[in-house]
């Protein structure tokens, strides 16, 4: 059985996580929703996939009029999360999960988080089976200006100084991360070109030169942690241990 991946822009894909799946010989099915690709039916998702990765994108959850696939995507995510189907959301994916669970998703009042930022694990995060053993603070790669309220009943797993809701768990197998756990160096370089408008925004204080300068020291630890977390989630989804 496959991992399904919901994609929202050509600039963002599974990247590092795709490499993990390739090494594990786990098939992947992409659904490029921004290109008009239809969503799978709920029955197709349950029947043909063991898990769902919901990737990032430049749009906001509140832009459903501009991106009409957002509402049906959230409806399917809500159904999946209520069934405790394994879902792994990154950046926009985490916001879609929050919205699917009835939480408010909105533009943040603080400056955008773009670049390398410390993230703190909460007490619930320290007890979580995915994040246990990962340390109380680590450096994450961020690219967002929107945020969300914590969904009712969700476990709050991580926070940061600018945006307190950085990660949550819904049920046993639904994980939402505001930060990016899939990025490789080429992704960061591509985003600096593709999303240059974000860097020029009045809400951004990001310095692209600083982002690139810090990358060699930060990317190795980020990628190692990302692989550990994803492998644990794959076990939760029913795949054998690596």
Image (cartoon, rainbow, N blue to C red):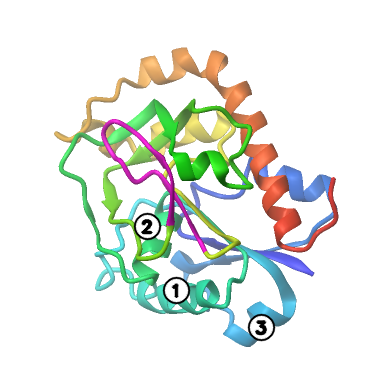
Is 175 in front, or is 116?
175
CB atoms at circles 1 and 3 under 8 Å apart? no
Q: Is 205 above or below relative to 190?
A: above
Determine the image quadrant of residue 206: top left
Magenta includes 165? yes
Magenta includes 222? no
Q: Please tell me which residue is depicted at 55% across the width and 13% down the height of the picture.
A: 217
Mark 1 and mark 2 lie on one chain; the one further toward the N terminus is: 1
Is 10 in front, or is 16?
16
Q: Please tell me which residue is depicted at 48% across the width and 35% down the height of the picture.
A: 190
Mark 2 and mark 3 lie on one chain; the one further toward the N terminus is: 3
Q: Which residue is mark 3?
A: 44
- Residue 194 locus on image (x, y percent): 40, 40
* Image quarter in which the C terminus is found: top right
Looking at the image, residue 102 sits to the left or right of residue 41; the answer is left
Q: Please tell me which residue is depicted at 38% across the width and 28% down the height of the picture.
A: 115
User: Which numbered dot is residue 217?
Assistant: none
Question: What crowding class fits label 3: few (fewer than 14 Cα within 10 Å), some (14-19), or many (20 or more)?
Answer: few
Query: What element does badge 3 sit on?
Result: helix
Chain part drawn in magenta: 155-170
C-alpha separation, residue under disc 1 versus residue under disc 2: 12 Å
Q: Which residue is mark 1?
A: 73
Query: What element does badge 2 sit on?
Result: helix
- Residue 68 locus on image (x, y percent): 34, 75
C-alpha separation, residue under disc 1 versus residue under disc 3: 14 Å
Question: What crowding class fits label 1: few (fewer than 14 Cα within 10 Å), some (14-19), or many (20 or more)?
Answer: some
Q: Mark 1 vs mark 2: give the one in front.
A: 2
* Image quarter in which the N terminus is found: bottom right
Query: What element does badge 1 sit on?
Result: helix
Q: Which residue is mark 2?
A: 95
Determine the image quadrant of residue 172: bottom right
Looking at the image, residue 201 sits to the left or right of residue 164; the answer is left
């Amino acid at each position: 059985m496959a991992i399904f991946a919901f994609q929202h822009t050509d600039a963002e894909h599974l990247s590092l996580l795709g490499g993990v799946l390739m090494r594990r010989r786990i098939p992947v099915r992409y659904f490029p929703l921004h290109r008009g690709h239809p969503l799978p039916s709920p029955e197709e998702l349950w029947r043909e996939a063991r898990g769902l990765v919901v990737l990032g994108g430049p749009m906001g959850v509140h832009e459903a009029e501009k991106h009409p696939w957002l509402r049906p995507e959230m409806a399917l995510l809500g159904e999946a999360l209520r069934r405790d189907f394994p879902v792994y959301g990154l950046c926009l994916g985490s916001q879609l999960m929050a919205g699917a669970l009835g939480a408010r998703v909105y533009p943040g009042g603080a400056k955008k988080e773009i670049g390398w930022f410390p993230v703190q694990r909460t007490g619930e995060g320290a007890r979580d089976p995915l994040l246990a053993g990962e340390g109380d603070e680590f450096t994450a790669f961020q690219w967002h200006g929107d945020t969300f309220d914590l969904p009712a009943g969700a476990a709050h797993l991580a926070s940061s100084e600018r945006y307190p809701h950085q990660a949550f768990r819904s049920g046993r197998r639904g994980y939402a991360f505001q930060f990016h756990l899939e990025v490789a160096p080429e992704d960061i370089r591509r985003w600096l070109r593709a999303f240059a408008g974000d860097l020029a925004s009045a809400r951004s204080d990001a310095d692209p030169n600083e982002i690139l300068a810090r990358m060699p020291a930060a990317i190795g630890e980020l990628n190692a942690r990302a692989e550990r977390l994803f492998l644990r989630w794959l076990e939760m989804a029913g795949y054998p241990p690596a």
